[in-house]
Image (tube, rainbow, N blue to C red):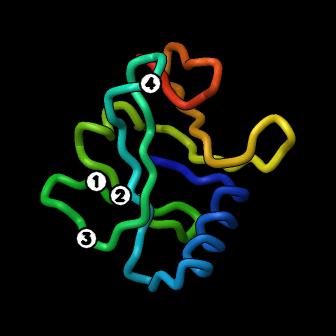
């Protein structure tokens, strides 16, 4: 399962509304190679699922990830921060053994 915090939920719905995206759009979460620690998160809106996609829903937010990314994202929570120390989405990932100082990448 992939979870969504209340703040992330609010921000996802606001971004969808501001972008005039319909109910058929969902949040695609994936892990790609790169960044200081070796792996980076990728977050986009999408409206087409692929054959090996894993589909989750938490707090009325539909999240979709490919099977390979899910191995890194299992039990992860998507959060949103609007504080002075950084604004944006971030992941609380219990599978990550370390992350870089900027929080954009991680390692397992």
Question: Disc 3 versus disc 4: distance between alpha carbons?
Answer: 27 Å
- Residue ID for mark 2: 64
Please state which of residues 66 and 102 is positioned toward the viewer in this rendering.
102
Residue 84 at x, y = what percent?
86, 40
- Determine whether label 2 and label 3 are within 8 Å by CB: no
Residue 79 at x, y = what percent?
64, 47
Q: Is residue 59 above or below residue 33?
A: below
Question: Disc 4 versus disc 1: distance between alpha carbons?
Answer: 24 Å
Sequence-earlier tag: 4 or 1: 4
Sequence-earlier tag: 1 or 3: 3
- Residue ID for mark 3: 48
Tag shown at residue 54: 1
Tag shown at residue 62: none
Sequence-earlier tag: 2 or 4: 4
Q: Going by the image, does 10 lie left or right of 71?
A: right
Residue 76 at x, y = what percent?
51, 39
- Residue ID for mark 4: 35
Question: Disc 1 versus disc 3: distance between alpha carbons?
Answer: 12 Å
Residue 95 at x, y = what percent?
46, 24
Q: Secondary structure at mark 4?
A: loop
Q: Secondary structure at mark 2?
A: strand
- Determine whether label 1 and label 2 are within 8 Å by CB: yes
Q: Secondary structure at mark 3?
A: loop
Q: Residues within 10 Å of mark 1 (few under 14, many from 20)?
A: some
- Determine whether label 4 and label 1 are within 8 Å by CB: no
């Amino acid at each position: 399962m992939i979870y969504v915090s209340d703040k992330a939920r609010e921000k996802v719905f606001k971004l969808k509304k501001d972008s005039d995206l319909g109910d058929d759009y969902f949040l695609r979460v994936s892990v790609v190679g790169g960044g200081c620690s070796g792996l980076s998160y990728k977050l986009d809106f999408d409206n087409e699922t692929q054959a090996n996609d894993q589909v989750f829903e938490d707090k009325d937010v539909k999240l979709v990830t490919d099977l390979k990314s899910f191995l890194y994202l299992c039990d992860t929570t998507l959060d949103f921060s609007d504080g002075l120390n950084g604004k944006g989405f971030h992941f609380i990932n219990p599978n990550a053994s370390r992350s870089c100082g900027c929080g954009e990448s991680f390692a397992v």
